[in-house]
Image (tube, rainbow, N blue to C red):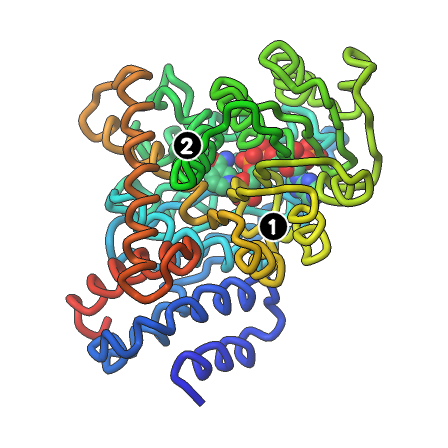
Amino acid sequence: MSMIDEVIQKVKSKDKDQPEFIQAVTEVMETLRPTVDKHPEFVKAKIYERIVEPDRMIIFRVPWEDDNHEVQVNRGFRVQFNNAIGPYKGGLRLHPSVNLSIVKFLGFEQLFKNALTTLPMGGSKGGSDFDPKGKSDAEVMRFTYAFMRELYRHIGPDTDVPAGDIGVGGREIGYLFGYYKKIVNEHTGVLTGKGLEYGGSLIRPQATGYGVTYFAAEMLATRGTDFGGKVVAISGSGNVAQYAVEKVTQLGGKVITMSDSNGVVVDEEGINAEKLVFVMDLKDVRRGRISEYLHKYPQAKYFGGKSVWDVIKEESLHVDVALPCATQNEISEDHASALVKNGVVCVAEGANMPSLLGAIKIFQDNHVLFGPAKAANAGGVAVSGLEMSQNSMRLSWTSEEVDSRLRDIMKSIHKASLEAAEAYGRKGDYLAGANIAGFIKVARAMLAYGIV
Ligand code: NDP
């Protein structure tokens, strides 16, 4: 059995109850095979075995009181995966599905993604099985305070810097930062995604959605084309999806889908800037459901209980570019085959691990440009890194400056992924290239430290 197979097997037997983590490790390790012969020094130092084991995993009780004065108990997580190249950095997810497997898979992916950004950040991730849906602002505040009451002792601006993810937006970051500041008595860059008034960066809310669009534009450019006139399918209607819709539309594409966990809107006339303003108000201010889009735009169609990819398959919708921006494992093999049949030329992952391994293979076998999450959605954490820099320097850059740095970072991630793929015999394979480029940087740092 090869060393890589042994590492995968060990994770499968040690972490057998963690399917998402096993999936993420398998995906990365499979693509690292070409590095083994070229780097005997990594093999000798057992970097491959060490890199799949987090530095530490913190699991804690989060008790809080709801509006009826009932005590509720949730479980909190922070997995500090690896800080070889910088302080731990990664988002917090609030969703009922959150468990150790999901947090570990996200932390592992984050490690390689952060290495690709060119900025000095290690990898971590956290969250809780708390469901913010249907909770009052006061309940969300009490929960986030209770969560921070334990988390604060494990984080710090030079130790571990959390940010948002699913279920954690501006409101939650405000509560988390406010409580941290209160109990630690320090106003530092301990969280990113902060409001502009208290240390946030311009363009941070837009960064992941803009970044995935910039990355897709770079991929399209390798085939001599761009977003102009392209039909684009986007899933989700949260932070990443909203700003992907905005940037795609600005670049001349026509977005025909958005979704939430209840269903999908298809608007074949295109979800333009005016309609997007309605969606942003609906989802972020009124906290409504995407089905309400039809109240305002009745020519659109709504498909309840389905994903964007189900609808494309069942309705045979033509799509040139697909940007999955909702959650993990959205795109199955069947969905991928339907996308290929319906004309897709480019898939860039806004969400983390939205495509199953079999789906990725179908895209690659059919010469679809496939941009994996850790490269394509790295714009969010990249601008978080820029927020940390601005906090340390105690100054703020203009939105033009941050956007231009974001565009340059996405270009350099695209280039680094292509170059690593070519150098290791996988020309044109962005998945292998991104994994290898991120891995080499972390592995070299780990090697420099000896056996710690
Ligand atoms: P939000 O909570 O803002 O939005 C998530 C969207 O996806 C919502 O529309 C939500 O629907 C939908 N969704 C969530 N879970 C499911 C599910 N199980 N099935 C169907 N739809 C679902 O999160 P973000 O936009 O921040 O994150 C989306 C993805 O992007 C995640 O994978 C995240 O890890 C990734 N990501 C986010 C970054 C960021 O900067 N925010 C950075 C890099 C990656 P509903 O409204 O019904 O909950």
Whether disc 1's CB lies below 8 Å from ligand 1 is answered: yes
Q: Quadrant of the C terminus?
A: bottom left
Q: Are marks 1 and 2 in contact (CB under 8 Å)?
A: no
* Residue at screen point 36% across, 19% down: 202
Give the structural element (helix, strand or loop) at label 2: helix
Residue type, mark 2 in image:
Tyr
Q: In the figure, is residue 371 to the left or right of 55? A: right
Q: CA distance from mark 1 to mark 2?
A: 21 Å
Whether disc 2's CB lies below 8 Å from ligand 1 is answered: no
Indicate which quadrant contains ligand 1: top right
Q: Which mark is residue 214?
A: 2
Q: Which mark is residue 328?
A: 1
* Residue at screen point 67% across, 46% down: 339
Relative to 416, say whether 384 is above or below.
above
Q: Which mark is residue 319?
A: none
| Residue lying at the far bottom of the rendered structure | 1
Relative to 95, say whether 272 is above or below.
above
- Asked if residue 65 shows in the view, the reply is no
- Asked if residue 228 shows in the view, the reply is yes
* Residue at screen point 64% across, 44% down: 95
Q: Position of residue 101 (x, y in %)?
A: 57, 61
Picture quadrant of residue 31: bottom left
Q: Quadrant of the N terminus?
A: bottom left
Q: Position of residue 185 (x, y in %)?
A: 32, 30
Residue nearest the observer in this picture, 117 or 142 = 117
Residue nearest the observer in this picture, 72 or 304 = 304
